Image (spheres, rainbow, N blue to C red):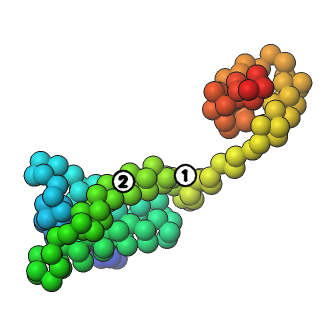
Amino acid sequence: MSTQPIAYYVIPVGKVVAFAAATVATFKAEYGLALAAGVHEPWAVAIPIASTVYGTIALATGKKADHLSAIVLMVICQVLAALVEAHIIQPSWWLVIVVACVPITILARVQSLRAPERVEGETKVQPKRKRRSAAQLLAEAQNLLNANPALSQTNLAELLDVSPRRLRVVLNGK
């Protein structure tokens, strides 16, 4: 018999079951909302899929701001779908605009999310890179090159945590 408390087993299983049930429950409403807003049938499926994937990724980041933005977007979709289905609101131009913005909003938000980074058994969110001015970057590059003249541009870009293209532009003074 295991010495682990029952919660050790129940919580992970419960998360999977709740995720599956919530996905099924929200899928129909978001799909119906997309259809009501004029999205054609084969493409309407993308709205609930994108919403679920975005929500899942946002929750995985571990940042409350990401959680909140995903939840707000998903709640708005669910409320609008319920209002349309109950005939409380009629599909109109503003509903079309709101639904049209959903995939674009999701795309923008997903691209801005950062995966948690594992550090010695702990998880922390990767900090955003601070963009340095060209002059700052050039000074740092020159210091590194003075210390190690044989350094390649690729290795220098890695050390400076910038793209090789940006480094080339800074070094060439463009």
The residue sitting at 15% across, 83% down in the picture is: 88
Image quarter of the C terminus: top right
| Residue 44 image point, x, y percent | 16, 54
| Residue 98 image point, x, y percent | 30, 65
- The disc at residue 71 is none
For mark 2, give the secondary structure.
helix
**Cα distance in 3D space between marks 2 and 1:** 27 Å
The residue sitting at 77% across, 37% down in the picture is: 134
In this picture, is 78 found above or below 43?
below
In this picture, is 41 found above or below 83?
above
Q: Are marks 2 and 1 in contact (CB under 8 Å)?
A: no
Tell me if 4 is positioned left or right of 165 in this view: left
Residue marked by disc 1: 117
Q: Which amino acid type is marked by label 1?
A: Glu
Q: From this viewpoint, is residue 2 visible?
A: no
Q: Residues within 10 Å of mark 1 (few under 14, many from 20)?
A: few
Q: Which amino acid type is marked by label 2?
A: Ile
Residue marked by disc 2: 104
The residue sitting at 43% across, 53% down in the picture is: 108
* Front in this rendered view, residue 139 or 174: 174
